[in-house]
Image: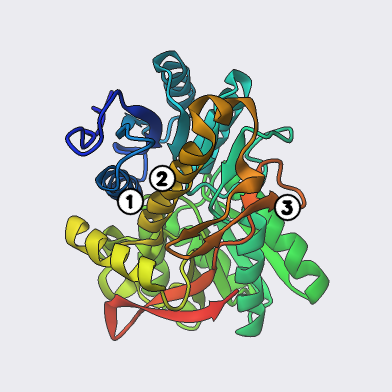
Amino acid sequence: MNTPSSTPEAGRAGGSSVRIGALVPLTRPGWVEAGRHLLAGLDLAVREVNDAGGIAGRPLELVIRDTAADPLRAAAAVDEFARLGVAALAGEYHSVVARAAAARADALGLPFLCSSAVLDTLTERPTDRVARLAPAQSHGWRIYADFLLGAGHNRIAVVTQPSVYWASGTRILRDHLAPRGGTVIELDMRTLTPAAVCDELAGNGATALLLLVGAPEPAVPVVKSVRRDRRLAEILIGAPAGQPEFPGWADALGEDGAAIPFLRYLPERLGPLGARVGTVLRQRLSMEPSFVAFEGYDTVTVLADVLRTHGTDRMRAAAPWPRVAVEGTRGQIRFSRAAGVGVWQWAWAPVQVVDRDPARPDRFRVLRSG
């Protein structure tokens, strides 16, 4: 699927457009809700840039391609963007897909600001071409592990599927919990049904179960089975990857989807810019904007500042990331080199552990900030 470009506000900014290639999951098996929010943030920021005169009088334009959570499709899109002469790449939600896009962008010398993917090893080698707004997985998931320990959970079961991302998450949890007296028990969804997961939990003494699996399948059936098993009435279900963030989770699970802590990347209170952008995004999406929508907006805000300051040619010639200092919706954005991360990293976006309130599943409770 080749999604059409967004239309630049040509009447408000003259001349040929400055193009940004946007990678977004818009069809299954991609996480479509996340893609919709990401695109809403990207598009809103582009429109505001153009309302303010564009890039040196030229309109900014998004050229959008649907990745559908497919790494090969994303790499092919990067090749296409290079042929189209885009100034930079933006977006992507899925970590494994973003990793494929980052590798191809680096090979082609194309700047890429990744909006949402968190996998630490976004590139196999250090690069000056790629930067990222989302916190590295190790940063956020360690905060989540500390939340579990603080809540009295030191025997943790994780139900997993084969994936670099889930394997990385399991390793981060185990490495962080083990020196602090915690244990991680791995349950493989390739060999277990949701009912069998319940039997394993009833026998292994775990007090928390983390969903390191896709949504809605198999996460939703696992949650339903655990919630209905009287042996597991006291067990905490958690989802550090953020499956409960979007309305589809509440629609599928209702009350069963509440009280499942997950990670999101928002401050406890938005500043004036974040509050204004949040109001507009709420109107556009007809729902509360997720942190992913703010990541999209911040991505274009950073790229527009870089393009105004360095120009499209100089952006390719020299890495602009260490010179960025931009006010985003969630705080001032600066990039640095973080340990174990081979790309330029905003260290760090705000991190929260939140859940849906059992009394009002449409409302979120902040359980921990980091």
Q: Which residue is mark 3?
A: 338
Q: Quadrant of the C terminus?
A: bottom right
Q: Is residue 80 left or right of residue 342?
A: left
- Which residue type carries mark 1? Gly
Q: Which residue is mark 1?
A: 41
- Mark 1 or 3 closer to N-term? 1
Residue 120 or 91: which is nearer the viewer?
91
Question: Residue 103: in sight, yes or no?
Answer: yes
**Contact, mark 2 vs mark 1 (Cβ under 8 Å):** yes
Q: Which residue is mark 2?
A: 300
Image quadrant where residue 26 sits: top left
Residue 8 or 344: which is nearer the viewer?
8
Question: Is residue 274 placed above or below 101 in the rendered structure?
Answer: below
Crowding around mark 1 (Cα neighbors within 10 Å: few <14, some 14 to 19, many 20+) is many
Q: CA distance from mark 1 to mark 3?
A: 26 Å
Crowding around mark 2 (Cα neighbors within 10 Å: few <14, some 14 to 19, many 20+) is many
Total tally of numbered discs in the picture: 3
Query: In the image, residue 89 lies at what x, y percent?
Result: 46, 32
Q: CA distance from mark 2 to mark 1?
A: 8 Å
